[in-house]
Image (cartoon, rainbow, N blue to C red):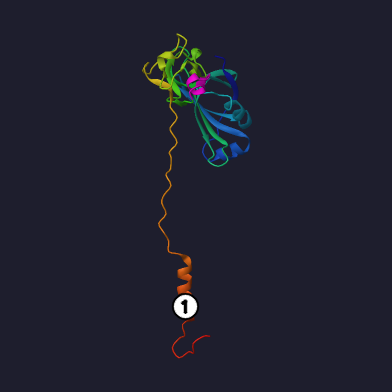
Amino acid sequence: MASIRINAEPRTTIGKGMYALRQSGKVPAVIYGPAVAPTPIQIDARETARVLSRVAGSQLIDVILDGQAHSVLLREVQRDSIRRDILHVDFYEVPTDRVIRVRIPLEFVGVSPAVRDLSGVMVHLIDHLEVECLPQDLMSHIEVDVSIIAKIGDSIAVRDIKLPEAIRVLMSMDESVATVQQQAAEEVVEPVAVAAVPAEPEVIERGRKEEEMPEEGEAPKK
């Protein structure tokens, strides 16, 4: 799988200097991994936003630092809670000579006849697979063809997903990935009987009679 690239520079700014660094259009970041000491770097904010918008799940990124390419996975992105600006990025440098464990997102494709013809409802039960493979065998996503679900109640299991031999699944092969369920019947609401209410004119008339009664010492109204 081809990786994407992002340019980086060594970073000496820490602590309170981070605000000024961000104001200058840079994003603080760090590269770490089993074969590398944590390395503070800084990357261009616009380039970072553009690159990260293209990163899907377990896709490799080449961070170019001092002319050397570091093959990394995106581990964490910290954002401003209101403006959603990128505040900090963690990159994990993967060892190229050993297998790694990652979660690869699932992408559901196709149309299930159970949905199209029988008005069923598609339910996605999991959204990723936990796998083990060499970094060069990583996939940005795994396609799941739901067109094989022909009847309501049928499902797709992990074993039904076609994967390259280089990728080893670490989950139960019997685990269900997606299924089609019957649509829930609409609830019929029975009309509620309304209790009888005394006729309004009687109330009004009684009130009028009370208003027309003379107070003590007052002459009757004509």
The residue to which callout 1 is attached is 209
The residue positioned 40% from the left and 14% from the top of the image is: 159
Is residue 146 magenta-colored? no
Other-residue count near label 1 (Cα within 10 Å), few / some / many at <14 / 14–19 / ≥20: few
**Image position of 214 (left or right of 62):** left
Quarter occupied by residue 54: top right
The x, y position of residue 133, in whole percent, is 44, 14
Horizontally, residue 86 falls left or right of residue 173, namely: right
Residue 100, horizontal then vertical, whole percent: 43, 17
Q: Quadrant of the N terminus?
A: top right
What segment is highlighted magenta in the picture? 107-118
Q: Residue at x 45, y 36 (%)?
A: 186
- Position of residue 16 measured from the top left corner of the image (x, y, whole percent): 53, 41
Q: Is residue 18 visible?
A: yes
The verdict on residue 113 being magenta is yes
Report the side of 193 relative to 141 (left or right): left
Rendered view: 218 above or below 16: below
Q: Is residue 99 visible?
A: no
The three-letter code of the residue at mark 1 reads Lys
Residue displayed at 43% across by 64% down = 198
Which residue occupies the foreground of this view, 101 or 32?
A: 101
